[in-house]
Amino acid sequence: MFEAEINSNCRNHTLPAKPTLNTRSGFFYCNFDQIFFLPYEPISVFDIFKIGVGPSSSHTLGPWRAAQAFILSLEEKGLLSDLIHLQVLLYGSLAKTGKGHGTDIAIQLGLAGYDPVEIDTSVIPPVIETIRDKKSLEPGLSIRFESSEDIIFLMNESLPHHPNALSFLADFKGHPSISETYYSIGGGFIEKEAGSHAEKKMVQLPFPIDTAANLLHWCRKTGLAINEVVLENELAWREDAEIKKQLGKIWKVMRECMYKGCHTEGVLPGGLQVNRRAAALNKKLLKGRTYGDYQGWVQAIKEGGKDFQYILDWVSCFALAVNEENASFGKVVTAPTNGAAGVIPAVLQYFICFTDEFSEEKIQSFLLTASEIGSIFKKGATLSAAMGGCQAEIGVSSAMAAAALTESKGGTQRQALMAAEIAMEHHLGLTCDPIGGLVQIPCIERNTMGAIKAITASQLALQSMPDFAKVSLDAVIRTMWDTALDMNSKYKETSDGGLAVHIPLSLPEC
């Protein structure tokens, strides 16, 4: 059997109904005289849900991780102590919107030895100020480094593999210079040029899943719910107790982010002078009801009843809160990206506050189901707005939330997949056009739209018979990828089109 790495052109070919499965290496798809190989890619729940720092998973978290990976690479080569000079080149979307997304800040933090999961976000401004004043990346690197000279934004250059590319150019004492290129491919995932697949630690999952059809197959064969299939796969990486602990940590960060956003006033950073709205809306909706912590807040929300407009306002408030925090370099969870981080917490909080089906144990099953839908989208299309527009962020997050909510409310596996399809179907073609390169307008409000669409999609699926559905989730994922390929690059997180060029604002160059 011939093996060839799949490329973007291969995605345009019609795939057979029953591809041959090789669980060790992947799926082989035969199309007349051509055979394409899709690399087997096991993705953990905690690959989809990552704790990090806003405002962008692809433009902040990804470059941060790339900087850490580069330092680790130098350590492994025994070259770190001989490093005398370092430059970072940013290409494509990273260059065009990097200032607004804090790409340069993230890179400096990564090179200086800070971790996005562990860092106290309150120290970020003074750390960056110290790096600028001292022209040094200590404690990580003691070499001279001046960000205005050593981080270079190549606005008119792109690399062919992905729009989000960055290269590290390093000079050493007594050793030839080297360069390494990394791609931030969406959702905080990074790939190193030449050999990223070989570097991944592969595991064999009991239920290999690359498509929605695969997922449904395993559900039918085992009788397990989607979240149960995902949990069985997750056990290939870690013990059950660790999975539950980490899922609890993911929800804790989401919850704290949302709660903080609902109680923080002010203006978002970046120069757009966007006012925070979640805190004022939270106060207005509660009408003086008091509380002292998250649980008290939930109870106060519930006491307001279940009027449709009241619920709608709260879902918007939840989503606004998360993404206002994200825009402020707050601690968030990629879900599956930072720009779309508010959708899943908002829908999950809706489930907690306003439905009769909620129970505490369903929080973890909700996250498990949502993660698998995100994983399928990553494998079949993209999670990167720089590749696919905002359909790849808000659209995917809405589909993830819709499926998870449907299953949590008692829907079947097919109804859950139907809900995901409906949610994405009505995000197809959504462009990414951040004003000033900032994840604020229209990004924050789009999270409210994605959350509401997820709830609507879930309700439609719960009241429908999947037997009569005309569009499958796999079909809509293929359609999303086709749309991404056809979309003009100015609508792919470049700030070269859409709202980004029609709002007359005076901002620093980004």
Image (cartoon, rainbow, N blue to C red):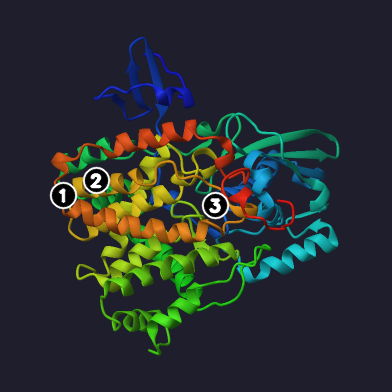
Disc 2: which residue: 418
Q: Is residue 184 visible?
A: no
Q: Secondary structure at mark 2?
A: helix
Q: Residue at x 38, y 44 (%)?
A: 375
Closer to the eye: label 3 or 2 = 2
Q: Secondary structure at mark 3?
A: helix
Q: Residue at x 40, y 90 (%)?
A: 288
Query: Of residues 364 and 205, which is closer to you in this image?
Result: 364
Say which amino acid is labelled 1. Answer: Ser
Query: Of residues 250 and 378, which is closer to you in this image?
Result: 378
Q: Residue at x 24, y 24 (%)?
A: 18
Where in the figure is residue 35, as x and y percent of width and height? 38, 16
Structural crowding at the residue carrying mark 3, measured as other residues with C-alpha within 10 Å and reported as few (<14), some (14–19) or many (≥20): many
Q: Secondary structure at mark 1?
A: loop
Closer to the eye: label 1 or 3 = 1
CB atoms of marks 2 and 1 within 8 Å: yes
Q: Which mark is residue 57?
A: 3
| Sequence order check, earlier mark of 3 and 2 | 3
Where in the figure is residue 170, as x and y percent of width and height? 78, 39
Where in the figure is residue 501, as x and y percent of width and height? 63, 48
User: Which image quarter: residue 269?
Assistant: bottom right
Q: Which mark is residue 464?
A: 1
User: Along the horizontal axis of the image, is 105 left or right of 352?
Assistant: right
User: Along the horizontal axis of the image, is 63 left or right of 454?
Assistant: right
User: Which image quarter: residue 95?
Assistant: top right
User: Which image quarter: residue 162?
Assistant: top right
Structural crowding at the residue carrying mark 2, measured as other residues with C-alpha within 10 Å and reported as few (<14), some (14–19) or many (≥20): many
